[in-house]
Image (spheres, rainbow, N blue to C red):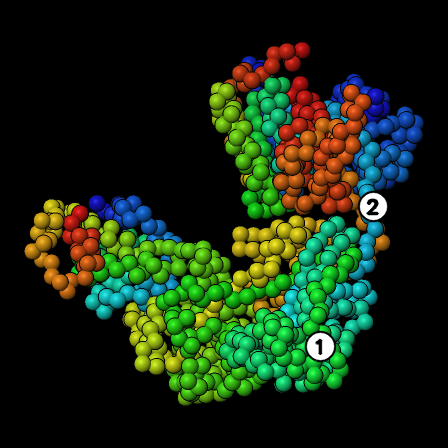
Amino acid sequence: MQVNGEFKPLIVAFCCNWCSYAGADLAGNNRLNYPAEVKIIRVPCSCRVNPTFILRAFQRGADGVILCGCHPGDCHYTSGNYYTRRRMAMLFSMLDYLGIERERTRVEWVSAAEGAKFAATMNDFVAQVTALGENKRLEDLRCKK
Amino acid sequence: MNNAQLRDEVIRISGVNPSKCMGCGKCSATCPAYDEMEFHPHQFVSMIKNGDLAPLLKSDSLFRCLSCFACVERCPRGVEPAKLIEAVRLQVIREKGANHLKPESVPAMVDEDLPGQLLVTAFRKYAK
Amino acid sequence: MQRIGVFVCWCGSNIAGTVDVKAVAEALSHEPGVVFSTDYQYMCSQAGQDMIKASVAEHHLTGIVVCSCSPRMHEATFRKTATAAGLNPYMVEIANIREQCSWVHKDMPIGTEKAIILGKAAVAKVHLNAPLTPGESPVTKRALVIGGGIAGIQTALDIADAGFKVDIVEKKPTIGGKMAQLDKTFPTLDCAACILTPKMVDVAQHENVRIFSYSEVSEVKGFVGNFDVTIKKHARFVKEDLCTGCGACVDKCPMKKVPNEFNLGMDNRPAIYIPFAQAVPKVATIDPAHCNMLKNGKCGLCARVCTAGAIDYTQQDEYVQEKYGAIVVATGFNPISMDKFDEFAYNQSKDVITSLEFERLTNAAGPTAGKLLRPSDGAHPHTLVFVQCVGSRCTACAEKGKEYCSKICCMYTAKHAMLVRDKYPDVDVYVFYIDVRTPGKNFDEFYRRAVEEYGVKYIKGTVGKVVPENGVLKVQASDLLNNKQLHIDADMVVLAAAIEPDRSARPLATMLTASMDTNDFFTEAHPKLRPVESPTAGVFLSGACQGPKDIPETVSQAGAAASKVIGLLAKDKLMGNPCVASSNEAMCNGCSSCANVCPYGAITYEDKEFRMPDRTVALRRVAKVNPAVCQGCGCCTVACPSGAMDLNGFKNDQILAEVDAICK
């Protein structure tokens, strides 16, 4: 999205309810700033995120998608994030094959105590995607009004 | 090479991670050549870990090690001290250049009572 | 079409300071389906909640979106409000415009724009919300405790004292477990039997407790509150109700050369036996592998001497079916095998023993009646060497040792060394240690006493090899602090063998669908906050089956597990979490992908009849989710290749609607 001639990426962040969403709340509690380009969707566990959700986000014009979950071994549902890790490895390699820059996607483990990490991660990710510019390859122009 | 480079080189050649050592001393407890050595197997591991290699390079202990691999067999953490010692020895031998034991000179040295393993370890030590 | 009301909260200036709440309410009022939109200072206040209730009635709302603080804060509040207003509580969605918007952005236009997008996403989701009702299931008010060691006994006693029925299943002929084999206990040195056997009697006499000894769990079905368990009672060839435990049969049995497992094979027992004097139940058991009568029908002496007529050579294994509301696993531990540790000559010399064998050797009821005698020749030893960490903290070879610290060895070795020096001051005692780990109340003081008052020689280093030679054990070891190699002629060597979970734990975990770690210890639902619960609902953990533990820790964990069980059994009905997975039978092809990833074993399969388009009836295997067991992680929904599996409250189309709303 271009705002006043400046590129503002659209970032979708999927956060698991137990760790990362709480980490994002903590970032808020501590008033740690991160760009408003990040929009968070709450899911019960990172393993709830179907790769198609990420493809859909790209299709609808997202410039970057980040998926946050509990640290390995800390999953509220014991093993969910291990499935996430494998599924995303598959998806990202497929995206790579399609020519989507590897930097547009990321999996990050953020615990409920890591508000600072959440904010830092978002700052970094937004900067990274901003540098890449608009996602044109996967965007479905038919979805644009 | 400075000490840090030397350490990295020894770790690379040996494929051993000395940080895995928990300092139990089983290598030195097992070592049959312990009393012959100035530096003992557990000291080797810790000195390499700390990059303190200069005294090792000069030490005779390198060649007192029998290369029997008892320490490798017994180490509970998979540190493999004998491989580290061998890698340090290799550094010394490489600096000296040339092989010190050639296959063709072996038949003359063979003795009925000589254990076969001695030849193997001799090649390990002197011919790289 | 839903009729949605949007309520934007100012949260004083917390939200209103960075977000133009009026603009948000205005923007969201144009969203499809939104029939009412407003803002208010404190939506969570009584006045705010009353406003929501009034609006529901006035505008006939079917869904509510509250733009406010985090759902982790007030989702429950607004769900209650919705219920009070006559709506289903799950028709409420929260747009988090405080923690994730106003508090992290400084610029009003930017904050407002983001708040509107978050609100739109919530509205899009509510459109697809469906009323959800938590399932209810009854609770069988009886608990099963698997394992009758100190962990199982304590858990059973605590549950029974609270007034609930408990069954203990113990695979050995008596309860008591490892603690019954111990001599003294650290750090107080009180005798294990003196504190354990009264508890064994208590539990046996408790009106709420039944003990199934010499029995195993053979099948577990069902779920939290409603487990169906089959218990296999092994034939002991003695009628438990008739046997008085007089021991006449034990004395008369001619087959006296069976290695006594209670004394770890250091002496012998007859083919009919009572494991030890204080056994509970005190009932004889015939070992069918060694009884002549059972093997070839020649003997029958025990039946002749039994005045109670309790011997029954025709007894068969028996299966008992029972229903339970909760299951506690207390399967305990065993020392690992020393077969792979050739360097210590364990299999070559009788004088090299494990610490548990040493316990029996110093126990007054043990094979030597408590005298410290060398096992090989019965002579008084003069030099003892204790070796710590045998197989613990070993990462080199998985078949040989364990990577974890066995936790109890440092303390029991200090105890053994101290006991020896106390009784026999002439004996030299060496302890070879890598580290001495003594976290625990009065633990370090205890270890220091062994060194300072009892003169135990602690040496930092370890034993490299033990060679039996001319009746002595040649010990070669390192002394790291003095940088020396030691050669000690020892009379006995005691190995602090690592401990591992009992072998029965793995098949049990499969039956219970409870998860285990790579070392076969049961995993807890949360390592810090739910340490006595298994991730599988209704399954609780007690004692060393969850990780190495000493007695005080085991007892406290046993009590904690009991309190969790009591909390469960005290309920008449279990209210489930309605946000659980559900499968669309028409789309399911029965591939098992979902069941394979489910961490709770909540998914089963059933064959169902389906009417096909050509009017025939086909039998198809389809997945069925048990809502009482499912915890709602949603892993199965992604694994499902046909898209049959979905998660209530976080349905695929709901999340996609949020994605679309954000990316619009």
Query: First in sequence: mark 2 or mark 1?
Result: 2
The one nearer the camera, C360 or A28, is C360
In depth, the one of A113 and C331 nearer the eye is C331
**Residue C49 in sight in this render:** no
Labels in figure, total: 2
Q: Can you say whether C227 is above or below A40 in the image?
A: below
Q: Is residue A23 above or below residue C545?
A: above
What distance separates the C-alpha of mark 2 from that of mark 1? 48 Å
Rendered residue at 26%/60% (across/down):
B68
Which residue lies under the disc numbered 1?
A: C311
Indicate the position of residue C398 as horizontal and vertical percent values.
45, 55
The chain that hosts pointer 2 is: C
Q: Residue at x 44, y 78 (%)?
A: C451
Horizontal side of C439 relative to B59 (left or right) equals right
Q: Give residue C553's mark.
A: none
Check residue C136 in the rendering and tell me which mark sits there, or answer none.
2
Give the image location of residue B42, x and y in percent. 31, 61
Image position, residue C108 (x, y; %): 67, 26
State the image quarter where residue C647 is shown.
Answer: top right
**Residue type pointed to by label 1:** Ile
Q: Choose between C75 and B6: the one closer to the eye.
A: B6
Residue type, numbered disc 2: Glu
In which quadrant of the rendered image does the C terminus of chain C lie? top right
Q: Is residue B31 above or below residue A104?
A: below
